[in-house]
Image (cartoon, rainbow, N blue to C red):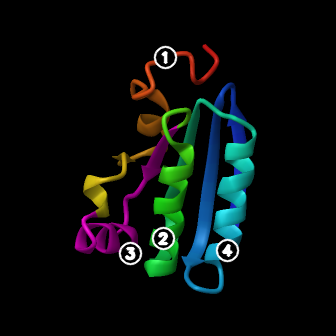
Amino acid sequence: MTVAVERLGRTVVLVVDGDVDLSTAPELHRAIESALDAGPRRLVVDLTLVRFLNSAGLEVLLAARRRAGQDTDLRLVATTRAVWRPLQVTRLHEELVIHASLPAAIAAPSSTGDEAATGG
Protein backbone atom coordinates (compact mmCIF):
# COMPACT_ATOMS: atom_id res chain seq x y z
CA MET A 1 0.00 0.00 0.00
CA THR A 2 1.14 3.54 -0.73
CA VAL A 3 -0.19 6.90 0.39
CA ALA A 4 0.46 10.00 -1.72
CA VAL A 5 -0.04 13.41 -0.11
CA GLU A 6 -1.23 16.54 -1.93
CA ARG A 7 -1.84 19.94 -0.37
CA LEU A 8 -4.40 22.31 -1.89
CA GLY A 9 -4.48 25.41 0.28
CA ARG A 10 -5.96 24.33 3.62
CA THR A 11 -7.05 20.98 2.20
CA VAL A 12 -4.87 17.88 2.41
CA VAL A 13 -5.60 14.96 0.08
CA LEU A 14 -4.30 11.46 0.83
CA VAL A 15 -4.50 9.10 -2.15
CA VAL A 16 -4.35 5.51 -0.92
CA ASP A 17 -3.34 2.75 -3.36
CA GLY A 18 -3.38 -0.96 -2.54
CA ASP A 19 -4.76 -3.17 0.23
CA VAL A 20 -5.64 -1.73 3.64
CA ASP A 21 -5.37 -4.61 6.09
CA LEU A 22 -3.76 -5.54 9.40
CA SER A 23 -0.25 -5.17 8.00
CA THR A 24 -0.78 -1.84 6.18
CA ALA A 25 -3.33 -0.08 8.41
CA PRO A 26 -0.60 1.34 10.71
CA GLU A 27 0.99 3.06 7.70
CA LEU A 28 -2.35 4.65 6.77
CA HIS A 29 -2.85 5.65 10.40
CA ARG A 30 0.56 7.39 10.44
CA ALA A 31 -0.20 9.22 7.18
CA ILE A 32 -3.55 10.46 8.52
CA GLU A 33 -2.02 11.50 11.86
CA SER A 34 0.74 13.39 10.06
CA ALA A 35 -1.80 15.15 7.84
CA LEU A 36 -3.97 16.10 10.85
CA ASP A 37 -0.92 17.36 12.75
CA ALA A 38 -0.56 20.02 10.02
CA GLY A 39 -3.97 21.42 11.01
CA PRO A 40 -5.82 21.30 7.68
CA ARG A 41 -9.34 22.69 7.42
CA ARG A 42 -10.27 19.65 5.31
CA LEU A 43 -8.74 16.17 4.98
CA VAL A 44 -9.80 14.05 2.02
CA VAL A 45 -8.85 10.36 2.04
CA ASP A 46 -9.20 9.07 -1.52
CA LEU A 47 -9.81 5.30 -1.42
CA THR A 48 -10.52 4.95 -5.16
CA LEU A 49 -7.42 2.79 -5.73
CA VAL A 50 -7.94 0.58 -2.66
CA ARG A 51 -8.47 -3.05 -3.66
CA PHE A 52 -9.18 -4.46 -0.19
CA LEU A 53 -10.37 -2.89 3.07
CA ASN A 54 -10.81 -4.89 6.27
CA SER A 55 -11.68 -4.10 9.88
CA ALA A 56 -8.18 -2.78 10.62
CA GLY A 57 -8.62 -0.19 7.87
CA LEU A 58 -12.12 0.66 9.05
CA GLU A 59 -10.78 1.29 12.55
CA VAL A 60 -8.17 3.68 11.12
CA LEU A 61 -10.93 5.63 9.35
CA LEU A 62 -13.02 5.81 12.53
CA ALA A 63 -10.00 6.93 14.54
CA ALA A 64 -9.38 9.63 11.92
CA ARG A 65 -12.94 10.87 12.30
CA ARG A 66 -12.58 11.04 16.07
CA ARG A 67 -9.21 12.79 15.85
CA ALA A 68 -10.40 15.28 13.23
CA GLY A 69 -13.21 16.32 15.55
CA GLN A 70 -14.79 19.67 14.80
CA ASP A 71 -11.57 21.32 13.65
CA THR A 72 -11.06 19.35 10.44
CA ASP A 73 -13.66 18.37 7.86
CA LEU A 74 -12.88 14.69 7.11
CA ARG A 75 -14.14 13.27 3.81
CA LEU A 76 -13.64 9.95 2.06
CA VAL A 77 -13.76 9.14 -1.63
CA ALA A 78 -15.13 5.64 -2.19
CA THR A 79 -16.14 4.25 -5.56
CA THR A 80 -15.36 0.54 -5.55
CA ARG A 81 -17.18 -2.44 -4.09
CA ALA A 82 -13.98 -3.36 -2.21
CA VAL A 83 -14.40 -0.19 -0.14
CA TRP A 84 -18.16 0.35 -0.23
CA ARG A 85 -19.10 -3.15 0.92
CA PRO A 86 -17.25 -3.04 4.28
CA LEU A 87 -18.52 0.51 4.89
CA GLN A 88 -22.11 -0.58 4.26
CA VAL A 89 -21.98 -3.86 6.19
CA THR A 90 -20.68 -2.02 9.26
CA ARG A 91 -23.00 0.95 8.62
CA LEU A 92 -20.01 3.28 8.71
CA HIS A 93 -21.28 4.88 5.52
CA GLU A 94 -23.84 6.52 7.83
CA GLU A 95 -21.12 7.89 10.13
CA LEU A 96 -18.55 9.12 7.61
CA VAL A 97 -18.82 11.75 4.88
CA ILE A 98 -18.32 9.89 1.59
CA HIS A 99 -18.13 11.27 -1.94
CA ALA A 100 -18.14 9.52 -5.32
CA SER A 101 -15.18 11.47 -6.71
CA LEU A 102 -12.18 13.47 -5.58
CA PRO A 103 -13.39 16.70 -7.24
CA ALA A 104 -16.75 16.34 -5.47
CA ALA A 105 -15.06 15.80 -2.10
CA ILE A 106 -12.89 18.88 -2.58
CA ALA A 107 -15.66 21.13 -3.93
CA ALA A 108 -18.54 20.24 -1.58
CA PRO A 109 -19.44 22.82 1.08
CA SER A 110 -17.66 22.35 4.36
CA SER A 111 -19.45 21.00 7.41
CA THR A 112 -17.12 23.16 9.54
CA GLY A 113 -18.54 26.32 8.00
CA ASP A 114 -15.21 27.38 6.46
CA GLU A 115 -15.72 27.67 2.72
CA ALA A 116 -12.11 28.77 2.20
CA ALA A 117 -10.75 25.28 2.87
CA THR A 118 -9.12 25.06 -0.54
CA GLY A 119 -7.55 28.45 -0.16
CA GLY A 120 -9.75 30.16 -2.71
Question: Which image quadrant: the C terminus?
Answer: top right
Check residue 19 for magenta coloring. no
Callout 3: SS:
helix
* Whether label 4 touches label 2, CB < 8 Å: no
The CA span between labels 3 and 4 is: 19 Å
Callout 1: SS:
loop
33 is higher (above) or lower (below) than 103: below
Callout 2: SS:
helix
* Whether label 1 touches label 4, CB < 8 Å: no
Q: Residues within 10 Å of mark 3 (few under 14, many from 20)?
A: some
Q: Which mark is residue 82?
A: 3
Q: Which mark is residue 115?
A: 1
Q: Earlier in the sequence, mark 4 or mark 2?
A: 4
Q: Nearer the viewer, mark 3 or mark 2?
A: 2
Q: Earlier in the sequence, mark 3 or mark 1?
A: 3
Q: Earlier in the sequence, mark 1 or mark 4?
A: 4
Callout 4: SS:
helix
The CA span between labels 3 and 2 is: 16 Å
Which stretch appears magenta?
73-91
Check residue 88 for magenta coloring. yes
Question: Which image quadrant: the N terminus?
Answer: bottom right
- x, y (%) of residue 32? 65, 55
Name the residue rendered at 37%, 59% in the picture: 79
Q: Earlier in the sequence, mark 3 or mark 4?
A: 4
- x, y (%) of residue 53? 46, 76
Q: Which residue is mark 4?
A: 26
